[in-house]
Image: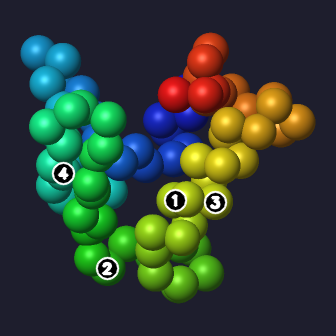
């Protein structure tokens, strides 16, 4: 249901392969621990303000915070 309200950085296609959405491309480090995303240009909030990396950082921090009880919180937020 949440996918009807929010865009994702990456979505999975019918074959469960990642496809770009808000992130137009990405690179994974050799050790698999770091993902570098290139954000799509021109994505705007309803207010007209353009999406930036700080918005994504704040959202990920909010999701990981146990006080928010976020639906998307990972089972192991230390990862």
Instruction: Look at the numbered discs 3 and 1 and tell me whether their residues touch, using CB distance below 8 Å.
Output: yes
Mark found first going from the N terminus, 1 or 2: 2
Give the residue pinned by disc 2.
Answer: 42
- Neighbor class of circle 1 (other Cα within 10 Å; few <14, some 14-19, many 20+) is few
Give the residue pinned by disc 4.
Answer: 26
Find residue 58 and name its label: 3
Q: Secondary structure at mark 2?
A: loop
Q: Is residue 48 left or right of residue 30?
A: right
Structural distance between the alpha carbons of marks 2 and 3: 19 Å
Give the residue pinned by disc 1.
Answer: 56
Count of numbered labels shown in the rendering: 4
Q: Secondary structure at mark 1?
A: helix
Instruction: Look at the numbered discs 2 and 3 and tell me whether their residues touch, using CB distance below 8 Å.
Output: no
Instruction: Look at the numbered discs 2 and 4 and tell me whether their residues touch, using CB distance below 8 Å.
Output: no
Residue nearest the observer in this picture, 56 or 30: 30
Instruction: Give the residue displayed 18% in from the left and 18% down from the top.
Output: 16
Q: Position of residue 40 (x, y in %)?
A: 26, 68
Instruction: Give the residue displayed 40% in from the left and 45% down from the top.
Output: 8
Q: Secondary structure at mark 4?
A: strand
Q: Nearer the viewer, mark 2 or mark 3?
A: 3
Q: Nearer the viewer, mark 1 or mark 2?
A: 1
Instruction: Give the residue displayed 61% in from the left and 28% down from the top.
Output: 78
- The answer to whether one can see residue 4 in this image is yes
């Amino acid at each position: 249901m949440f996918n009807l309200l929010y865009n994702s950085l990456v979505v999975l296609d019918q074959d469960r392969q990642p496809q770009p959405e808000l992130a137009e491309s990405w690179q994974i480090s050799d050790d698999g621990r770091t993902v570098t995303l290139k954000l799509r240009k021109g994505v705007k909030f309803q207010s007209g303000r353009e999406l930036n990396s700080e918005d994504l950082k704040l959202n990920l921090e909010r999701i990981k915070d146990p006080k928010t009880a976020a639906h998307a919180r990972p089972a192991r937020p230390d990862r």
